[in-house]
Amino acid sequence: MSKKILIVEDEKNIVDILSFNLSREGYDTLEAYDGAAGLKLALEEHPDLILLDLMLPKMNGFDVCKAVREQDSSTPIIMLTAREGESDKVFGLEVGADDYITKPFSMRELLARVKANIRRTELVSAQPSAPAESGGTRLERGRILIDENLLMAFKDGKALDLTQREYELLKFLAASPEQVFSREVLMERVWNYEGFVGDVRAVDVAVRRLREKIEDDPASPEFIMTRRGLGYLFRAG
Ligand code: CA
């Protein structure tokens, strides 16, 4: 079945070129030209991925993203931002976007990211079908427990409210405790960006958000440690 991509963008020429190229790649597309219409389609049509412009009539991209994430933690959202402002990009990630692309973007790069994000959700949704009795589906790391059948993580027995990406990042790091992973490697392995050489700040933001949810004191983490200049590691308790 074709994957469905929702484009929320008020510039018609951009919508047209996106929709043309995505259709040519075999995706179905839905289009919304303002934030409110985009949110409605996002919640009603359950797209497989959302391309979300930042500056939109009626409701901006940040607010759309936040509202989508309140009900849906897993659909990949890629923000399209015309702004050069660094804070906008980071804020987009803070409110739950998976990634952003700065306009003007190359269609090749955009299609690569769409593919990577859709492949990631496919990999994840394929996992729960593994037989529960096969074992090795629970990862216990001290106070943290990761249940790969439930796709959930627990701390001290209490379920953590993680987005899909945060869950995957935690699972990836916890699977190899005490091993340092660079941002580039995490981008490739957790974000599925093969040969990723661009902006790796999405990793830092995801780590910060994850720490806010799993650490007793995010300012002095005890689970997810930073090795300055090298990357991140999960401490084996
Ligand atoms: Ca716009």
Image (cartoon, rainbow, N blue to C red):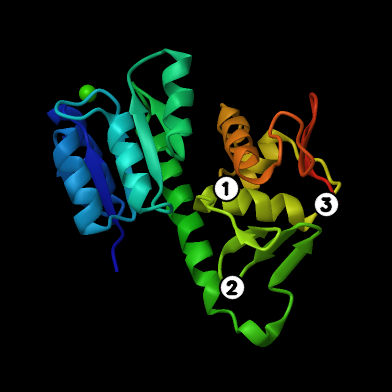
Residue picked out by circle 2: 149
Q: Residues within 10 Å of mark 1 (few under 14, many from 20)?
A: many
Q: Earlier in the sequence, mark 2 or mark 3?
A: 2
Classify mark 1: helix, strand or loop. Answer: helix
Label 1–label 3 contact, CB within 8 A: no
Marks 2 and 3, Cα distance to the nearest angstrom? 20 Å
Eyeballing the image, is 193 above or below 56?
A: below
User: Please, what is the three-letter code of the amino acid marked with disc 3?
Assistant: Pro
The residue most toward the bottom is 133
How would you rate the neighbour count of disc 2 (Cα within 10 Å): few for under 14, some for 14-19, many for 20 or more?
Answer: some
Note whether 27 is above or below 222 in the view shown: below
Counting residues from the start of the chain, the first of labels 1 and 3 encountered is: 1
N-terminal label among 2 and 1: 2
Determine the quadrant in which ligand 1 lies: top left
Q: Is residue 30 visible?
A: no
Label 1 and label 3: CA atoms lie apart by 17 Å
* Amino acid of disc 2: Asn
Q: Please, what is the three-letter code of the amino acid marked with disc 1?
A: Glu
Under tag 3, what secondary structure?
loop
Which residue is painted at 28% across and 63% down in the image?
2
Q: Is mark 3 within 8 Å of ligand 1?
A: no
Q: Is mark 1 within 8 Å of ligand 1?
A: no
Q: Which residue is mark 3?
A: 177
The residue nearer to you, when weighing 6 against 220, is 220
Q: Nearer the viewer, residue 197 or 52?
A: 52
Distance CA(mark 2)–CA(mark 1) = 16 Å
Q: Secondary structure at mark 2?
A: loop
Whether 153 is drawn above or below 93: the answer is below
Q: Is residue 106 left or right of residue 165?
A: left
Would you place residue 139 above or below residue 91 in this image?
below
Q: Which residue appears at 44% of the width and 43% of the height?
A: 112
- Residue bearing the label numbered 1: 166
